[in-house]
């Protein structure tokens, strides 16, 4: 909150909105492809999501979950994504399930 107030005080609301827009774009562009590293992708997604939240950029929990799942383009996760979408889990629960699936993929 203090950081938001300082940014707003010195840079104005337009800078804060620009930061939020940039973070939303980065969040939507954080994707996992077949050649990508699942841990790095997940860490980048979560870091950007937390930055967005701390800068006052509201993203609903279902929107965050949808963005997270939609950005997984690795064919090793197709069946997992179809199954996990049927459950109404929180983002944290999806992350835990993703880590378990990533461990299985990395082992095989």
Image (cartoon, grey):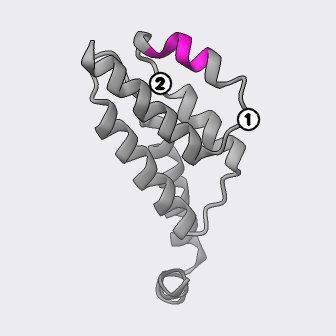
The N terminus appears in which quarter of the rendering?
bottom right
The residue tagged 1 is 88
Give the residues drawn in magenta, as a range.
77-82
What secondary structure is the magenta-colored segment mainly?
helix
At a point 59% along the width and 45% down the height, the residue shown is 91
- The crowding category of the residue bearing disc 2, from other C-alpha atoms within 10 Å (few below 14, some 14 to 19, many at least 20), is many
- Residue at disc 1, secondary structure: loop
For this view, does 67 lie left or right of residue 26? Answer: right
Residue 64 appears in which quarter of the rendering? top right
For this view, does 79 lie left or right of residue 48? Answer: right
Q: Is residue 47 above or below residue 80?
A: below
x and y, in percent, of residue 99 in the image: 41, 34
- Residue at disc 2, secondary structure: loop
x and y, in percent, of residue 87 in the image: 71, 29
At a point 55% along the width and 81% down the height, the residue shown is 12
Q: Does the magenta stretch include residue 62?
A: no
**Cα separation between marks 1 and 2:** 18 Å
Residue 31 visible to the viewer: no
Residue 60 visible to the viewer: yes
Q: Residues at badges 1 and 2 in contact (C-beta under 8 Å)?
A: no
Nearest to the observer: residue 3 or residue 41: 41
- The crowding category of the residue bearing disc 1, from other C-alpha atoms within 10 Å (few below 14, some 14 to 19, many at least 20), is few
Number of labels in the image equals 2
x and y, in percent, of residue 78 in the image: 52, 12
The C terminus appears in which quarter of the rendering?
top left
Q: Does the magenta stretch include residue 81?
A: yes
At a point 57% along the width and 20% down the height, the residue shown is 81
Residue 72 shows which numbered tag?
Answer: 2
Nearest to the observer: residue 44 or residue 104: 104
N-terminal of the pair, mark 1 or mark 2, is 2
Q: Is residue 14 above or below residue 44?
A: below
For this view, does 85 lie left or right of residue 72? Answer: right
């Amino acid at each position: 909150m203090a950081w938001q107030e300082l940014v707003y005080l010195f840079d104005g609301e337009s800078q804060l909105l620009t930061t939020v827009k940039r973070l939303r774009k980065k969040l939507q562009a954080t994707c996992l492809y077949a050649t990508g590293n699942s841990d790095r992708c997940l860490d980048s997604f979560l870091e950007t999501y937390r930055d967005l939240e701390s800068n006052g950029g509201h993203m609903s929990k279902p929107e965050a979950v949808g963005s997270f799942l939609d950005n997984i383009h690795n064919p090793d996760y197709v069946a997992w994504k179809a199954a996990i979408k049927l459950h109404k889990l929180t983002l944290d629960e999806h992350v835990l399930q993703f880590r378990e699936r990533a461990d299985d993929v990395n082992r095989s």
